[in-house]
Image (spheres, rainbow, N blue to C red):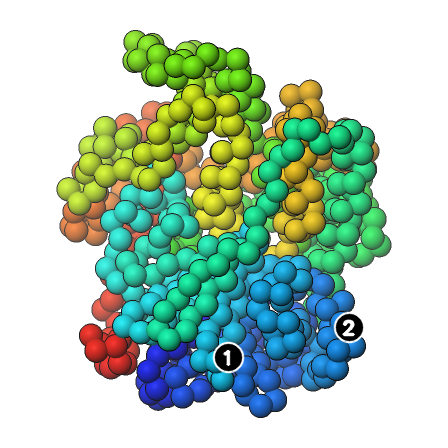
């Protein structure tokens, strides 16, 4: 894991290098072990290193070929790099380090970028500068585990691991009102944009080629779709999942630094810890606890650790006086309000003195279908197959006369999904409409909505609503919230997080399984639950899913209320016309009796804190910026 930055522009080495150093400072916490830079007449690459493979100076980046014709900066881990190195050595390549980075460099020269990407297994974001070809390649891994952003203007391109790097180097545009709208809807900025105009996220499984002042994106992978006709029994699915999962865990245990794991009370992290123990590796598992809270899973995790015979440590989280939001704002390059990120940040801080690689259970729910909406949408999809044409339009008229709250809320939404498909699912999400109804939106955001709410309702979409949702979710919540949460929290403390459930072989196998297998008997994540029943315990396999959560909505209404009130009494969001602070404070006061604030109020508080930090940064000395001519200037 590392931080990468770079710039390709008109030849002006001094200013190019200065800008890259400013960008590098913004990603310094991603790589606390070393920093490095390489310059060519029109390009500069920068790197902050977290040493995981070959801790010697031979693994330093940027890494270049002996003739300096090619240079690379890389963030991530290539799990099959030793096998690829053997192939390259057989072809005559010579190596000077024991790193996966050098395998990428030599692999590019031997196979080219597209064949290289087709061979590697791992999580990665890397940039390759080919000096003779005057070409830059930016590559992001198949699922989008590692972030990579870029900005193009006036015949130049800059890239970085964080949006904050563009701000610090004067490459960020104005704040994007649509990105702010997305954040207030979801608690994160979507993959389709960044908080700054003019800065883009490279999509997952994409190669960007930059040459002659122009960029072209090429997708190189997509997961298979579920095959309802696949002749696979539930027993065969469980056995193959176990085989692939053990292989995925084994690949992720290799490192030249200490390795540990996360352990909640649930299926996925318990299976990770079981596989580690099965493979004979001695590790410590860590659990976040919220004592006395209904979400606390520490007792279940303790039981699992005893069952597996692994070392275990529990980190207690209590609300205290501080909300922790300043740390949340510092750790993420864009506004980010995922509550469990607070727990991940605390865990990462506690773990770092003892380990550098952390195995997690992320991704199991997403590919093996572990969320309640997966079962609901599967049932709606099956119902839609029997609905006659025109049902969708008729239902949309009828539903206006049916209450959408109370006992009828769930049945109405279920009918929506069957009759309206993905458009209905996207519209059911609480967010901007509620903010508008409460009068919280300022004049600059009133009347706005998010792209997903514009998806049309369709009876045809209802017949494939689960399939449509999974594809949509993989490009939105999965990468923008779930993966971002783990990457941002761990990298802020110099940890490398690895999840076996994000393994390409396992993911492709799981994604192709029929829904009837993954949801066998109406049970969420049936394949993994059966594996957990066999290898861990009945309690883990069939316990109620709670997830890894921090009760910020209760704490905001209780011990954190004073800090939130104080923040909005001097609101930057209000002063600039984004939110109405008086409406926010009224909603906070109204929540006192319930002991629980709406999620959107927590989002508003995180955004207010982010804005205060942003405005403070703007008062710092001006960074090097790109002038109107396209050349670098102060």
In the rendered image, residue 564, in percent from the top left (x then y), is placed at 31, 44
Q: Is residue 90 left or right of residue 569?
A: right
Local SS, label 1: strand
Name the residue rendered at 81%, 38% in the picture. 239
Q: Is residue 189 left or right of residue 62?
A: left
In the rendered image, residue 179, in percent from the top left (x then y), is placed at 31, 49
The residue singled out by tag 2 in the image is 86
Name the residue rendered at 28%, 31% in the picture. 433
Local SS, label 2: helix
Residue 392, compared with residue 573, is above or below; it is above
Q: Residues within 10 Å of mark 2 (few under 14, many from 20)?
A: few
Residue 232, compared with residue 335, is above or below; it is above
Name the residue rendered at 30%, 13% in the picture. 397
Along the line of sight, which residue is nearer the eye, 92 or 75? 92
In the rendered image, residue 246, in percent from the top left (x then y), is placed at 78, 49
Q: Nearer the viewer, mark 2 or mark 1?
A: 1
Query: Which quarter of the rendered picture does the N terminus lie within?
Result: bottom right
Name the residue rendered at 45%, 86% in the picture. 39
Marked residue nearer the N-terminal end (2 or 1): 2
Residue 308 is at least partly visible in this image:
yes
The residue singled out by tag 1 in the image is 130
């Amino acid at each position: 894991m590392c931080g990468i930055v770079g710039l390709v522009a008109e030849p002006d080495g001094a200013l190019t290098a200065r800008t890259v150093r400013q960008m590098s400072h913004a990603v310094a916490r991603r790589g606390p072990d070393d920093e490095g830079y390489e310059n060519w007449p029109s390009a500069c690459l920068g790197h902050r290193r977290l040493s995981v493979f070959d801790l010697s100076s031979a693994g330093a980046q940027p890494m270049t070929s002996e003739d300096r014709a090619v240079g690379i900066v890389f963030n991530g881990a290539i799990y099959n790099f030793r096998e690829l190195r053997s192939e390259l050595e057989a072809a005559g390549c010579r190596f000077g380090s024991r790193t996966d980075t050098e395998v990428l460099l030599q692999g590019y020269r031997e196979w080219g970028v597209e064949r290289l990407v087709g061979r590697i297994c791992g999580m990665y974001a890397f940039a390759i500068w080919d000096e003779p070809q005057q070409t830059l390649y930016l590559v992001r891994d198949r699922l989008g585990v590692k972030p990579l952003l870029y900005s193009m203007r006036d015949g130049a391109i800059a890239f970085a691991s964080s949006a904050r790097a563009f701000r610090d180097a004067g490459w960020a545009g104005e704040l994007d009102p649509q990105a702010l709208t997305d954040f207030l809807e979801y608690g994160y900025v979507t993959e389709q944009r960044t908080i700054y105009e003019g800065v883009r996220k490279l999509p997952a499984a994409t190669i960007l080629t930059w040459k002659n002042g122009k960029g072209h994106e090429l997708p190189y992978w997509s997961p298979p779709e579920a095959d309802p006709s696949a002749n696979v029994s539930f027993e065969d699915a469980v056995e193959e999942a176990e085989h692939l999962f053990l292989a995925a865990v084994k690949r992720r245990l290799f490192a030249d630094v200490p390795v540990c794991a996360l352990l909640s009370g649930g299926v996925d992290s318990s299976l990770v810890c079981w596989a580690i123990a099965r493979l004979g590796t001695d590790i410590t598992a860590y659990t976040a606890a919220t004592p006395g809270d209904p979400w606390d899973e520490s007792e279940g995790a303790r039981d699992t650790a005893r069952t597996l015979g692994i070392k275990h440590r529990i980190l207690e989280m209590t609300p205290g006086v501080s909300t922790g939001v300043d740390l949340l704002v510092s750790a993420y390059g864009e506004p980010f309000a995922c509550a469990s990120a607070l727990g991940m940040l605390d865990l990462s801080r506690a773990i770092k003195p003892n380990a550098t690689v952390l195995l997690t259970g992320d991704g199991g729910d997403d590919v093996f279908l572990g969320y309640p909406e997966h079962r609901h949408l599967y049932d709606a999809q099956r119902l839609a197959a029997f609905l006659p044409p025109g049902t969708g339009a008729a239902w949309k008229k009828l539903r206006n006369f049916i209450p959408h709250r109370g006992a009828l809320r769930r049945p109405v939404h279920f009918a929506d999904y069957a009759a309206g498909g993905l458009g209905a699912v996207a519209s059911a999400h609480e967010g901007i409409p509620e903010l508008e109804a409460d009068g919280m939106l300022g004049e600059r955001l009133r009347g706005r909505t998010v792209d997903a709410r514009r998806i049309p309702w369709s009876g045809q979409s209802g017949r494939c609503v689960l399939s449509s949702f999974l594809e949509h979710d993989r490009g939105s919540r999965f990468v923008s919230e779930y993966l971002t949460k783990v990457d941002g929290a761990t990298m802020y403390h110099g940890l490398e997080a690895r999840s076996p459930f994000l393994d390409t072989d396992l993911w492709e196998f799981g994604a192709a399984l029929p829904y009837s297998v993954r949801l066998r008997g109406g049970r969420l994540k049936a394949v993994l639950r059966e594996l957990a029943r066999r290898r861990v315990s009945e309690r883990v396999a069939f316990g109620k899913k709670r997830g890894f959560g921090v009760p910020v909505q209760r704490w905001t209404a209780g011990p954190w209320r004073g800090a939130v009130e104080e923040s909005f009494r001097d609101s930057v969001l209000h002063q600039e016309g984004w939110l109405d602070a008086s409406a926010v404070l009224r909603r906070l006061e109204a929540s006192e009796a319930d002991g629980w604030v709406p999620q959107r109020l927590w989002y508003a508080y995180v955004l207010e804190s982010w804005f205060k930090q942003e405005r403070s940064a703007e008062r710092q000395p001006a960074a090097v910026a790109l002038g109107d001519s396209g050349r670098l200037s102060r």
